[in-house]
Amino acid sequence: MKTVGIIGGGQLGLMIAQQARLLGVRTIALDPAADAPAFAVADERIVAAYDDSAALEELCRRSDAVTYEFENVPGRVLIPLCRRYNIPQGFRPLYDSQDRLREKENARANGFFTPEYAAVDDERSLRATVERIALPAVLKTRTLGYDGHGQQVLRTEADIERALPLLAVPCILEEFIAFDYEVSLVMVADGERVVTFPVGRNVHRDGILDLCFLPAGMEDGVLARLRQVGERFMAQCGYRGILAVEVFVRGDRFWFNEMAPRPHNSGHWTIEGATTNQFRELVRFLVGEPLEEPQIVAPTVMKNILGQDLAEAEKIAAERRPNVHVHLYGKSESRPKRKMGHITFVGMTPEEYARDWAARFV
Ligand code: AMP
């Protein structure tokens, strides 16, 4: 029996461990919190910080292959381990995604369009860049941003003044794309082939993913082009394992926004809404099994459950309705805006969701 080590024990680690178990693969998760969600399912646990090299080494020693669900594992810790242990995704896709400037340069160099951007470090470079790419624009910290944290949309002079404190750390200023909608491309590559999950449309609220609708309703030609650009990107970058790319779409154009070399919130719907799911294909890749091409089962809606929706989600779970799949991550503390679970509605259209379900959530 093979063992997969997971750096990070949040909900992504939990769902990797669940799918691994269904495939007969053991898991060990490492997380600093003794009550991390993945520990409820993983076969073994290591409670330690993400930069504790001795603990990470222990994880690697006990695993046949190691993956990460946490994006900010430092290179100084991971790179030496990649040399000595089987970490099939390597450090490279993490490195490429840990800094928004590097991330966009890499995306452009490998075939994606991106919004215009430039590094800005102080008020002078910010104002010079605003001159060049014009307002509206989006100012983001280069590292450690997530779910809309560490970013500000600039529309007016007053917004520029208000945004100055962000410049305490290195930032990037991006052209604001007035997109029609956002989608994500979740791909798994094994060095020979790339499988791509059906593309869903993402709806954010307050910078956090709220809903995914499948299919995305993209025009066939644009969808085919996006998949082709994505697959070529994986191949040219030499990435193996899983990668999620968030994309803005307007008309027949699309722009790379950001990427993550781990399962993605916008791919949770695949557990019930597709013939194989993002966690399962990641595990199959890690243990050297051939990848399976995913197919959509039926139109699907995924609703994220944040702290403020938890009580309603528990009620829905108790109703035990067919094709309504409630996932609660078992986090010990519920807070507004904290991701506590998700619900997947299989066989549902956006219109049906709006009519029958939307009003149940705040
Ligand atoms: P990010 O953290 O980069 O994924 O940004 C969070 C959300 O902010 C995105 O999902 C978009 O809805 C919005 N956003 C980020 N960058 C831009 C941009 N350049 N133009 C328009 N909207 C953006």
Image (tube, rainbow, N blue to C red):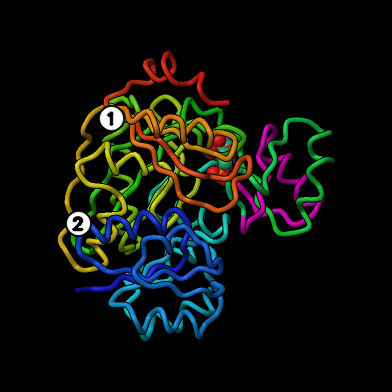
* Picture coordinates of residue 263, whole percent (x, y): 38, 53
* Picture coordinates of residue 221, whole percent (x, y): 27, 29
Disc number placed over residue 323 in the picture, else none = 1
Marks 2 & 1, CB-CB < 8 Å contact: no
Name which residue type carries label 2: Arg
* Picture coordinates of residue 191, whole percent (x, y): 23, 64
Q: Which portion, as a residue range, is magenta? A: 116-144
N-terminal label among 2 and 1: 2
Residue at 33% in and 68% down: 27
Residue at 44% in and 83% down: 57
Q: Is residue 47 above or below residue 231?
A: below
Q: Secondary structure at mark 2?
A: loop
The image shows a total of numbered marks equal to 2
Name which residue type carries label 1: Asn
Residue at 22% in and 46% down: 276
Disc number placed over residue 193 in the picture, else none = 2
Q: Secondary structure at mark 1?
A: loop
Is any part of residue 108 visible from this angle?
A: no
Residue occupying the far front of the picture:
318
* Picture coordinates of residue 246, whole percent (x, y): 45, 43
Q: Nearer the viewer, residue 285 or 345?
A: 345
Q: Nearer the viewer, residue 163 or 296?
A: 296
